[in-house]
Every structure is written in C-alpha cells, then in structure tokens.
Amino acid sequence: FNYSDPEFLHGILLYGLNTIISKSLGNQRPVPDTRDKMCLKKRYPTRLPSASIVICFHNEEFNTLFRTVSSVMNLTPHQILEEIILVDDMSEFDDLKEKLDYHLEMFRGKIKVIRTTKREGLIRARLIGAAHASGDVLVFLDSHCEVNRVWLEPLLAAIAKDRKMVVCPMVDSIDHLTLNYYPAPIVRGAFDWHLRFVWDTVFSYEMDGPEGPTTPIRSPAMSGGIFAINRHYFNELGQYDKDMNLWGAENLELSLRIWMCGGQLFILPCSRVGHVDRHIVQNVTQVLRALRYNNLRLVHVWLDEYKEQFFLRRPDLKSIPYGNISERVELRRRLGCKSFQWYLDTVFPELETSLEMKANNFH
C-alpha cells in the first residue's frame, strides 16, 4: 500500500483511517463471526425490550458511518429495534448532509437524524440523542463501528433480567489502515491512578463455570462509547455530567456511578461489535484540555480521600478550575451512593494493590 499517496494521507489527517479502503468497502460488508462456538447454542427470550440505538458523529467519514448504520439494520431483528437516532454534532462536510439523508431513505421509518445547532461534544450530543429516544433500552454506539451477528439480543436479555444491569459488548478491533476485522481477546475494562482507561486480562479460571467462555465478565469500568442501559435507569442514575466537555473521562465517571450507586457493569462475550481504532490528529490540544477538566470533575465528585492518589501523579492539575460540581455532589447524596473505598474493596481491589500505591504508602 502506498503510504505517500496524497489521498491516503488526506484521509488519515481528516478522519484517522484509510479512506481509500473504506470507499472500496462501500456501504456494507460481511464481517467474521468472532463469537465462541458456545455462544451459538445460547437461546434468548422471544420477547425482549425494544432498543433505541444512539449514534453521534462529528465529521465522520461517510462510508464508515454508513457501514455502522447498515450493519445495525442488517443484523438486528426489527421487532427489537425501535429506532436508530443519529445525532450530527455540527459536522462541516457536505456528504454528511443531503447525501446522507438521501442514502438513509432506504431505511425509512427506523432512522431519526437530529442536527445540533452548535458543537456540543460527544457527551452532550448523546444526551440530546437519549432525550429523543423512545425504546426501553438505550444502546450507545460510536460512529465507526460494525456490529456482529446476534449482537443485541444478549445485551437486551441481561437488562430484561435486571434493570440496573449495564452491559457492554466485547469490542473487536477494526484496523484503521487495513480495515481488517480482528477478534478481541476476553478482557475487562479497568483504569490506573492517572485515570487512564486500560484493558485488563481475565484469568482463565474465571471462565471455568458452566457457561465457560460465554460467562458475563464483571467489569470495573467501560471503555467508552459502546454500552446498553435501561432508558429509565439511565435517567434515574443522572445520565451524563452535562458540564463535561467534548469527550473523555465520561466513561469512567459513569462506571463509578453505576457501581457505587447500586448498579452493575458487565461485558458480555457473546455480544460482539467491531470498532475502528482511529488515529486522531486533529484538535489534540482541545481534546486534552477537555480530558483534564472532565477528569477533575470526576475526581472531586467520586474519589473521596483517594483523590490524593490522582494528584500525587498529576500535581500540575491541583489548582486547575473544574467548574461547579454541586449538582453532581447532590446527585451522589440523593442516590445514596457508596464510598470510593467500598468500590476499591468490592469491585476493583487490584487498583489499590498496585505497586505505585504501596510505594506511596498512602493510608
């Protein structure tokens, strides 16, 4: 492949992926079924809650976005698909306007497009999408995904059993240069004391029960954009912190809130969604500034005395303003949430026993 091709370089700079291959793949393609064979034997209830799929985008590459939508339309039983809500967060590219609307005509009746009047950022764009949703369950997807076979049924079945269960598919990887689709290993979401999200190994003995490799995985954190939650529960839980900017840290904030305020977060290995690992080079300063601000809001609302662990690693952030958090502090009080110490003891003891923690001898 010619990496000096101007069209290739332009695509990487603008979209963070190989637009030449994306165009050649077109609007839809088959992807390999990456589920374990045991998943194929699983049966799901015939009556499942309905789902509203919320996909927000800003200047997404046209074919990538369209493959996301058509994979959902092609691989989701229509009786459980209430609607797909596309939120266009002030995209500047012409092909995401009339051309997109024209192509979406083929899916008449199932798709709503909402266009924001100013740049909201992913967090607030998702809140706008959720406010327009009418399904029993909200399913958030990124705009550069391709869902796999029987991806939605496991998510809905888990939520139907327990409305306070928040579930994520296993996120397979779509290479940003080749757009090849690769299966993800069995992992759980976690983070370090810098509040950087990391994938964490799941030990094989955890999958030794009767369900084997199809066992739901208890996850301390979610990676970000791809999860399902009962719509009323999302509202009760306080949705997202709408004062967070752009994107970043909202996944960890929601993960802590789910666990500390009476919910549970699991990854379901039988639900698979491919995700393009884009390499974004635009607006890096703006994104990092938003991440810093969002992290501080999380730290001051949820970490209790453990915020010192964060500031030991980021002393430069100690005096940075983070806006008014009184609404989120009140939400935590109103929901009767547990302490961060409880979260460490019960959900994520590995964080506390990290070597860094011992070296700092904090307690």
Image (tube, rainbow, N blue to C red):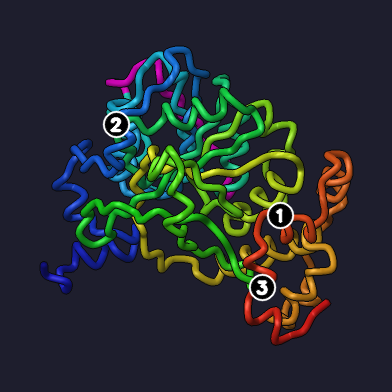
Quadrant (top left, top right, bottom left, bottom right) of the N terminus: bottom left
Left-right relation of 24 to 286: left
User: Identity of the amino acid at label 1?
Assistant: Thr
Looking at the rendering, the stretch of residues picked out in magenta corresponds to 105-121
Q: Which sits earlier in the primary sequence, circle 2 or circle 3?
A: 2
Residue 313 found in image quarter: bottom right
* Residue, disc 3: 353
Placement of 357 over or under 260, stated as above or below? below
The reply to whether the magenta stretch includes residue 41 is no
Mark number, residue 40: 2
Q: Which sits earlier in the primary sequence, circle 1 or circle 3?
A: 1
User: Identity of the amino acid at label 2?
Assistant: Leu
Left-right relation of 167 to 195: left
Placement of 62 over or under 295, stated as above or below? above
Q: Position of residue 285 (x, y in %)?
A: 55, 71
Mark number, residue 346: 1
